[in-house]
Image (cartoon, rainbow, N blue to C red):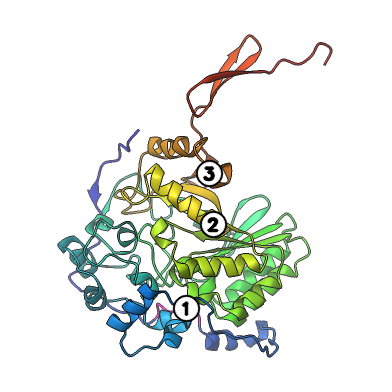
Amino acid sequence: MESKCTIISTGMKSSEPLAVDLTDEPPSISEALSESHYFIPQPVTRFSNTSRIPLSSRSLSFMQEFFPGATPSDWANWQWQIRNSIITLENIGRIIHLNEDETSAIMQHAGGVPLRITPYYASLLSRDNPSQAIRKSVIPVMGEYISSPCEAEDPLSEDEQSPVSGLVHRYPDRVLFLTTGFCSTYCRYCTRSRMVGNNNRFRGSISQWHNAIAYIENTPAVRDVLISGGDPLTLPDSQLEYLLGSIARIPHVEMIRLGTKVPVVLPQRITPKLIRILKRFRPLWMSIHFTHPDELTPETAAACNLLADAGIPMGSQTVLLKGINDDVNILKSLYHGLLRIRVRPYYLYQCDPILGSSHFRTSVAKGLEMIEGLRGHTTGYAIPQYVIDAPGGGGKIPLLPNYFQGYDNGDIVLRNYEHKMFRYPDSLPAGL
């Protein structure tokens, strides 16, 4: 069931090295205040904006080697982490030994997802092993410049299902609210690579939010709002509080979800002040993007436990990636670790066919193999739903191994995880 798509060159090459685009920054508080007629004044709070995330020995050693002028207080500050993110060939080359493929890809970068990695997440990268799973997920390679006819810039047709800028309305009762084009760390397989980063395709603003909020207010069928981006947790506290409050006040909105990778790549963002804000808007759920068990560090565990202690239910969303996590034991280790920090495995996504993603995509058969290897071999709480987000805007479609074997003399024939056959009586009693 391997893809039959023919590989062709995209021609996305440039002789210029990766440059810093100063527009690739999270929305600033000054931008928010410039449109203050949409802003609600925020009360003064005694809650600290200082992280309570521990400084692990690994982080401390990394900080002392590569950021010798920084203090533990600097490292614990999420704004410091963003300001000091690794965004150039020179900087990443100081931290890891780049191979020729990685170097060429960074040098030839043009227009797509930029290089950006927080110092914290960079501390998890293998210095000498380019095959390390999380290194492959954030360091560019030349495979990004290869595409196939089955790939697309917007494979899920989000732009076609956007009634107002920054809002996707695909399902009858829920909408996707895109807040920003910024992430603190960019995944190379991002389904919104067309609009995130420094390509200026999407830059959220308060006025744009206002139009999206008005659409939700005028669409009573919408009961569920998923706030995503980019990453909404890179927004300043005041903007995030304003957005959550504006949506929560809409009578027919029953729940709000936040889609984020911040607890994984920037756990220092989970501050007491942020927790206070999030606790105000219940029911609020959080979907966190985890990739590999290497991400389950003391810092990330602390961030997730703080969120859980605040009463925020969390689910994980993992993209199945070739050579990164397409192994049952890797996924089982990830999911067991997530349950220990109170994060419920939710979705296992088949990688979307974005441009330049062929080196990340597995076969669908491989995804079914992952579910088969989990079902019956671990607790049901550790088994996500394997889905394909259908190209063309069809939405998420679940896939399962073939446990249902058919009918026989009024019975359903079922196969279990041990490949044993069982019958279940499916005929109704007479007269019913």
Left or right: where 332 falls relative to 69: right
Is residue 191 on the magenta stretch? no
Residue 143 location (% of width, % of height): 25, 55
Q: Amino acid at mark 2?
A: Arg
On-image quarter of the C terminus = top right
The residue at which mark 3 appears reads as 383
**Segment tinted magenta in the rendering:** 23-27
Q: Residue furthest left?
A: 100
Q: Predominant secondary structure in magenta?
A: loop
For the question of whether residue 270 can be seen, the reply is yes
User: Which numbered circle lies on residue 142?
Assistant: none
The amino acid at mark 1 is Pro
- Separation of disc 1 and disc 2 at Cα? 32 Å
Secondary element at image label 1: loop
Sort mark 1 into few (<14), some (14-19) or many (20+) by Cα contacts within 10 Å.
many
CA gap between label 2 and label 3 equals 14 Å
Q: Mark 2 Cα within 10 Å, few/some/many (few <14, many 20+)?
A: few
What residue is pinned by disc 1?
26
| Residue at the (66%, 77%) spot, across then down | 276
Quadrant for residue 222, please give it. bottom right
Closer to the camera in the image, 410 or 252: 410
| Amino acid carrying mark 3 in the image | Ile
Q: In the rendered image, which residue does mark 2 sit on?
A: 340
